[in-house]
Image (spheres, rainbow, N blue to C red):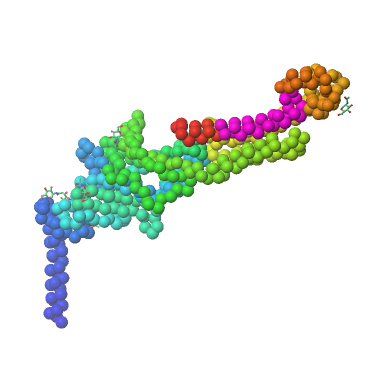
Amino acid sequence: MDFSRRLSCILLILAFTWTLVSCNIKTRKRREKGRLTGLQRQDVLQVLLNNSSYNPRISPDYEQDHATIVDVQIYVLSIDTVSEQSMDYSMNIYLRQRWIDPRLQFVNLSKALWLEIDFKLMSLIWVPDTFFRNEKKGQFHDVTVPNRLMHLYRNGTIYYSMRLSVLLSCHMKLQKYPLDIQKCPIKIASYGYTMENIIYRWIAHKPIDYNEELQLSQYTLLTHTLDNCTKTYKETGSFSCVQANFILARDVGYYIIQVYVPSVLIVILSWVSFWLDVEAIPARISLGVLTVLTMTTQSSGARASLPRVSYVKAIDVWMAACLFFVFASLLEFAYINVLARRRVPYRCFSSPDSFDNTTENNGITDSEKGDKPKLARKDSKGLHLYGKQGARYIDRISRYLFPLAFIIFNLGYWLVYYFVDM
Ligand SMILES: *[C@@H]1O[C@H](CO)[C@@H](O)[C@H](O)[C@H]1NC(C)=O
Ligand SMILES: *[C@@H]1O[C@H](CO)[C@@H](O)[C@H](O)[C@H]1NC(C)=O
Ligand SMILES: *[C@@H]1O[C@H](CO)[C@@H](O)[C@H](O)[C@H]1NC(C)=O
Ligand SMILES: *[C@@H]1O[C@H](CO)[C@@H](O)[C@H](O)[C@H]1NC(C)=O
Ligand SMILES: *[C@@H]1O[C@H](CO)[C@@H](O)[C@H](O)[C@H]1NC(C)=O
Ligand SMILES: *[C@@H]1O[C@H](CO)[C@@H](O)[C@H](O)[C@H]1NC(C)=O
């Protein structure tokens, strides 16, 4: 009993002294280069991070004349909403940054290739003060713990990734709406460090990476372009910035179904009027007014979700043209109605007495035989444009003229907006 207690006491003391000695050795061995390669991983962190010479409040190359180069990569998880109304879009991304902090090398401390760092330890390591220049709203994800990852490589490279939801402003040009292609940027820059201390760079391999299941509701992601948005401010200096532009093409399908096809049908409906009789005044009037009203409602509905920009959009041109066409067919009726009631100038072919008969029978009556028909025939070209016959003649012409004009307009419209860049 006594012996075993003494033995355990001795063992304890031995263990304690060994710990002390090894601790001492550890610190000493750091100075003796090359020999200290067997440190445990957590001790490496202890040595690296709880060493008074490492200060996370100082950037890695603060004393050097060169800046710390931060390589950036974006992994796009989803692009959720693209709003024309508020001119922004929201994204869910992994923002990955990589830089070298020479103070955190552990080549001589351990054989481990890299260390994974817990999120609670991350506050002990310097990270760049990255922000998005065109951000409106941003959010970290904290369920169940902050969604961050940090890897420390033996040569001092730090790989830092976090999950973010950001709402970014994107100034859209809606001249070709809804046949438009938008360029939505994301600008990554440092807020506090000028180019003296931080320079951003897109990572060489796949600077923008996408989730394979990435799908946008109203757009097709065509491609992306990379840019340099480094900016110099007079007051504070120049700040490094990298930019990626997502090229988004609007899916026209929705608008074809919701806007273009219905309005084409309404325009066609307005032409039905030309096949109705000149006498069918209520039918033709109601058809004309109905199509004009429907067109007006359609056009205001199609533009409801758009901001009130002052320039003319493709959809405005379309709606205005359709409205013009239905309105023109209503006007055509008004014109031929007046024409049908207009008196045929009897001087041409008839005597004042037979005037009443001639108008009712479109200028050609049985009573006009003898030398008078000659006169009528002589002027028969002008006769087209008078009375009911003239009205019917104009209706007949309209049956071809209106569709032809509409087809020509369509050709021009689609050619201009689909193929011409604005
Ligand atoms: C590691 O040890 C080698 C020599 O063994 C030395 O040249 C190098 O500077 C050391 N690295 C660090 C970070 O102490
Ligand atoms: C960190 O080092 C200081 C001395 O520099 C020491 O007082 C402190 O206990 C250490 N902290 C940890 C968690 O080891
Ligand atoms: C921290 O590093 C310095 C040398 O860079 C060394 O002198 C000192 O002993 C280290 N301290 C700890 C607690 O490891
Ligand atoms: C540091 O190590 C990582 C991982 O092994 C490697 O990808 C990177 O190129 C190294 N960087 C330098 C500057 O050697
Ligand atoms: C961006 O442009 C600035 C000068 O305008 C230049 O100093 C910097 O190196 C450029 N950055 C990249 C990543 O090319
Ligand atoms: C009008 O024509 C009818 C026959 O269509 C004839 O009976 C009548 O006399 C004509 N009236 C005049 C004023 O010519």
**Side of 384 where 245 appears, left or right:** left
Residue farthest to the bottom? 1
Q: Position of residue 7 (x, y in %)?
A: 13, 76
**Side of 387 where 419 appears, left or right:** left
Q: Position of residue 183 (x, y in %)?
A: 42, 38
What residue is shown at x 55% (from left), y 45% (from top)?
257
Residue in the foreground of this view, choosing between 250 and 400? 400
Magenta highlight: main SS: helix
Q: Quadrant of residue 45?
A: bottom left
Residue in the foreground of this view, choosing between 131 and 29? 131
**Side of 234 where 353 appears, left or right:** right
Residue in the foreground of this view, choosing between 378 and 108? 378
* Residue 369 among those drawn in magenta: no
Q: Which residues are magenta?
A: 383-408
Residue 336 in view: no
What residue is shown at x 57% (from left), y 42% (from top)?
261
Q: Is residue 399 above or below residue 214?
A: above
Q: Quadrant of residue 59?
A: top left
Quarter of the picture containing the N terminus is bottom left
What residue is shown at x 14% (from left), y 79% (from top)?
4
Q: How many marks?
A: 0
Q: Is residue 256 above or below residue 316?
A: below
Q: Position of residue 330 (x, y in %)?
A: 69, 33
Q: Position of residue 96 (x, y in %)?
A: 32, 48
What residue is shown at x 45% (from left), y 37% (from top)?
171
